Image (cartoon, helix red, strand yellow):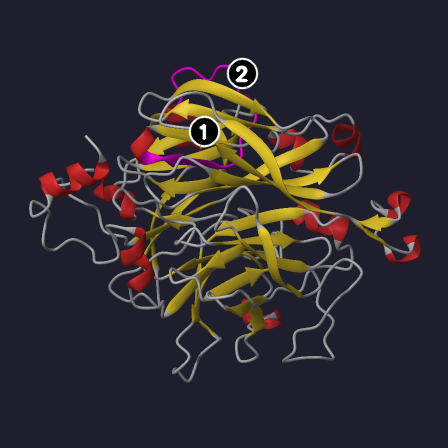
Amino acid sequence: MTATEHDHEHHGHEHHDADPTLYRTPADAVAAPPEGLAYVVGFDPDGRRPDALFTVDTDPASGSYGRVVNVAEVPGLGDELHHFGWNACSSALAHAGHHHPDRRYLLAPGLRSSRLHVFDTRPDPVRPRLVKVVEAEELAAKAGYSRPHTLHCGPDGVFLSCLGGAYGADGPGGVALLDHETFEVLRPWETDRGPQHMAYDVWWHLNQNVGVTSEWGTPSMVENGVDPELLLARKYGHALHFWDLETGRHVQRAELGDEHQMVLELRPAHDPMASWGFAGVVVNVEDLSASVWLWHRDGDAGEFSVRKVVTIPAEPADPDTLPPALRPFGAVPPLITDINLSVDDRWLYVSAWGTGELHQYDVSDPFRPRHTASVRLGGITGRVPHPAAPDEPLTGGPQMVELSRDGRRVYLTNSLYGAWDAQFYPEGIRPWLVKLDADTEGGGLSVDERFFPRGEEFRGRRVHQTRLQGGDASSDSYCFR
């Protein structure tokens, strides 16, 4: 049965009180009202104050537009809140006629503490309340994992990708399954992991029953910063893994070449009938370039193929202007640390955290991305200021990139990971959140000069990832066309 037939068969049997932000199709999501709030996690790199969830006003008509309007702290210290996400999203509609959990709770894992914090955005979405903490012991005992990194809401539960094994084990990393509404750790998702050992992101093609995972490194490889010996020995992740989504069985390993180190963010097509997507690679150790890869397959069966579709070269630089880690190379690597694909699958955004550039590509033909615009902010040597504060050199660079459902607004944060920030930006990272306006017709980017929360607005925390009220381009997968 096709998704469309499935849709018709079950249409009318759904609960009428379903959360309106569970969108049936990508087009419905694009047409929905714009976000009024953004949520951003922040961490204290010194571990002296609790990490926090910030609420930022994104309504241009509001008097507090572009300002932090609430801070919700976690109870412990040293969590390093990193990636976070919703408990439920549009993938819940894969089970038409079933109970659908609401997009209500934000789940924020501590990458260093292995604790998972659950915030309730009701009744007041401006002031989320911490309602539960899932301790590291539960994640270890029930799933066998630690160092939770990325989560996505799936049709049957929350998929929580973890870098480390339980009780101090360095690996293998993998995916824990959590209940949508109780947040109980259920079990490990994998039933047969095959050659997979390192973890990073997890995503899927729901209608094709395909899971996809990527590779960064085990905790010992990442927690103290980039290890130059491991990097030059090509020991970080350099492959994609494809799975049977329903059973958790490993199906295929797709090698990108071991010079392509650290395969990070996965962005599958939002079109539920498509079976292609993009993956970002941080660095090529042969020339310090960075790249974006396309995975695809012909038809509904057969193995996946991968191909490099975007290459961004390193930029030569005076060694005296570089941090110690880069002086021997005499160049600034782009360091692609995040990518994002618009809900209509037309625009791809690529963060080059090293050079301080956010790139926009037209991917109407995903095999041939066409570069359409870029904006520079910060950068290892550039320190390019925001136009609203031209005398204020920026630290960090475009890092995590989040995109509104309609594709017109791009949100950027500037911290990568505490130990890695110090290697590439040794002068420190002063936090900022930037909004760009995107031309979704012919392409183009411009900086919104009214939106620039930064510095002490984040109360001494660095900010890493943004989620948008009602969902965003990288938090939802869709079941119907």
In which quadrant of the rendered image does the N terminus lie? top left
Q: Position of residue 30 (x, y in %)?
A: 33, 60
How far is disc 2 from disc 1 in space, using C-alphas? Answer: 21 Å
Q: Earlier in the sequence, mark 2 or mark 1?
A: 2
Q: Which residues are magenta?
A: 189-206
Q: Position of residue 288 (x, y in %)?
A: 77, 42
Q: Is residue 246 left or right of residue 381?
A: left
Q: Is residue 185 visible?
A: no
Snapshot quadrant of residue 379: bottom right
Q: Is residue 129 left or right of residue 421?
A: left
Q: Is residue 43 above or below residue 149?
A: below
Snapshot quadrant of residue 434: bottom right
- As helix, strand or loop, the secondary structure at mark 2 comes to loop
Q: Is residue 82 visible?
A: yes
Q: Residue at x 29, y 64 (%)?
A: 32
- Residue at numbered disc 1: 297
Q: Is residue 124 above or below residue 2?
A: below
- As helix, strand or loop, the secondary structure at mark 1 comes to loop
- Residue at numbered disc 2: 195
Q: Position of residue 292 (x, y in %)?
A: 60, 42
Q: Is residue 444 above or below residue 180?
A: below
Q: Is residue 326 left or right of residue 201?
A: right
Does the stretch in magenta take in 113? no
Mark 2: amino acid:
Pro
Mark 1: amino acid:
Arg
Marks 2 and 1: CB-CB under 8 Å? Answer: no
